[in-house]
Image: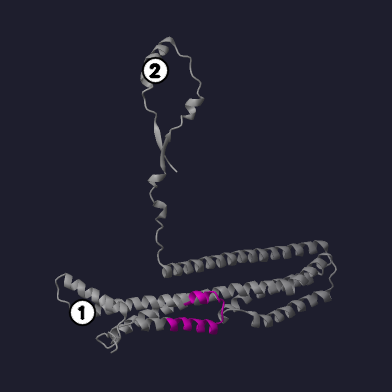
């Protein structure tokens, strides 16, 4: 004959924790002299179990989002799929723990969905920020590799008055051609959601391109024939480059700081999760064990080092008499002992 499962008033199978909570409520009612009423008691237990089900489900969802964070930046489609997997696992945990009528469960599901929405918004924001920083860094490195080297060569030749008008025209064509090549490469190499790709292009490539074209235009208007003009334009170009370099260094420092803070937050959340799973460790009381009486012995207390090294003063006649009168009783004084634990 098999055992039958305990079911709730609405016909759902009761969990072990729900059964124990109900039993505890009945005993508490009896101890207070009241007559246990299973209906109200069960409603109370059901509310408690639903709250616990929501907490456990959100905990599962947060764990899944930690794993998603390690995969960022991701595209919109990939991020949506990863968030959905985490939400599905959390809902499965919720269904395993829920009891009570459907009307009460619906309220708990609404609370659960609110938690999902808040977690999804946080992960989407972090994905956007990480994608933006990654794209900006990639564009800066590509600009330096594809364009900046050639521009530096042209600047040096312009300062020396060695650039012709034809070469200046070719410089503009060169910049525009490299920008189009970079645009094609960025379409396949850009990371993160589509919303985080346009701003890095405007902030990095367009600004550098406009600055470079203005610099070349200033060369053409000056003709490259005057040393003073060359020096003036070189100073303008140097200031522009310095400003761009300072902005790049500031952004790189900010990126490094934010990446380090993100690692610290992830490590703290993982440590918190391990603490929740393992519980509190027992205190080790072995260090507080008492001394073994069999290892205790008495030995003479050593003389004070200060008194041993201090030179004795020459006794006076009165001191000699007092010393001789007290010598008899002094021999009777018992030596001091001290305890030593081996």
Q: Is residue 74 above or below residue 236?
A: below
Q: Seen in the image, is 71 located left or right of residue 325?
A: right
Residues at marks 1 and 2 touching, judged by CB atoms closer than 8 Å: no
Give how far across and how far down residue 293 sits, in percent. 38, 45
Circle 2 packing at 10 Å, graded few (<14), some (14-19), many (20+), is few
19 is higher (above) or lower (below) than 324: below
The residue lying toward the viewer, choosing from 140 and 63, is 63
Where is residue 17 shown, x and y percent of the image? 31, 77
Q: Residue at 25% across / 77% down in the picture?
A: 22
SS at mark 1 in the image: helix
Of residues 84 and 339, the one nearer the viewer is 339
Quadrant position of residue 143? bottom right
Q: Which residues are magenta?
A: 64-89
Residue drawn at the location 24% of the way across and 76% of the way down: 23
Residue at disc 2, secondary structure: helix
Q: How is the image coloured?
A: one colour
Q: Position of residue 304 (x, y in %)?
A: 46, 29
Q: Which residue corresponds to mark 2? A: 327
Q: Is residue 69 magenta?
A: yes
Residue ID for mark 1: 40
**C-alpha span from label 1 to label 2:** 93 Å
Count of residue discs: 2
Outermost residue, front direction? 294
Quarter residue 180 falls in: bottom right
Q: Nearer the viewer, residue 70 or 335?
A: 335
Q: Residue 193 in the image: state x and y as whole percent.
A: 56, 80
Dominant SS of magenta comes to helix
Q: Is 11 inside the magenta-drawn segment?
A: no
Which residue occupies 40% across, 35% down? Answer: 338
Furthest residue in direction top, as rendered: 317
């Amino acid at each position: 004959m098999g055992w039958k499962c305990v079911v709730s008033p609405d016909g759902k199978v009761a969990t072990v924790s729900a059964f124990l909570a109900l039993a505890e409520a009945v005993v508490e009612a009896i101890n207070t002299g009241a007559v246990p009423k299973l209906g109200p008691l069960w409603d109370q237990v059901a509310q408690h179990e639903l709250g616990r089900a929501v907490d456990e489900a959100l905990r599962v969802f947060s764990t899944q989002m930690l794993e998603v964070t390690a995969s960022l930046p991701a595209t919109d489609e990939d991020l949506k799929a990863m968030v959905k997997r985490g939400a599905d696992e959390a809902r499965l945990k919720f269904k395993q723990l829920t009891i009570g009528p459907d009307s009460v469960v619906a309220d708990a599901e609404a609370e659960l969905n609110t938690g999902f929405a808040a977690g999804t918004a946080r992960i989407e924001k972090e994905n956007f920020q990480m994608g933006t920083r990654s794209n900006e860094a990639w564009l800066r490195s590509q600009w330096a590799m594809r364009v900046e080297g050639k521009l530096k060569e042209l600047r040096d030749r312009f300062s020396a008055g060695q650039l012709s008008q034809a070469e200046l025209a070719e410089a503009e064509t060169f910049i525009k051609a490299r920008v189009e090549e970079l645009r094609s490469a960025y379409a396949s190499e850009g990371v993160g959601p589509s919303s985080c790709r346009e701003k890095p292009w405007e902030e990095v490539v367009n600004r550098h391109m406009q600055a470079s074209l203005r610099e070349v235009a200033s060369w053409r208007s000056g003709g490259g024939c005057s040393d003073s003009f060359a020096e003036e334009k070189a100073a303008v170009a140097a200031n522009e480059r310095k400003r761009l370099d300072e902005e790049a260094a500031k952004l790189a420092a900010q990126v490094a700081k934010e990446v380090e803070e993100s690692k610290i937050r992830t490590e703290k959340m993982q440590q918190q999760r391990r603490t929740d799973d393992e519980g509190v460790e027992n205190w080790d009381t072995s260090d507080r064990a008492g001394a073994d009486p069999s290892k205790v012995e008495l030995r003479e207390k050593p003389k004070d080092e200060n008194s041993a090294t201090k030179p004795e003063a020459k006794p006076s006649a009165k001191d000699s008499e007092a010393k001789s009168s007290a010598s008899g009783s002094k021999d009777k004084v018992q030596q001091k002992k001290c305890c030593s634990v081996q």
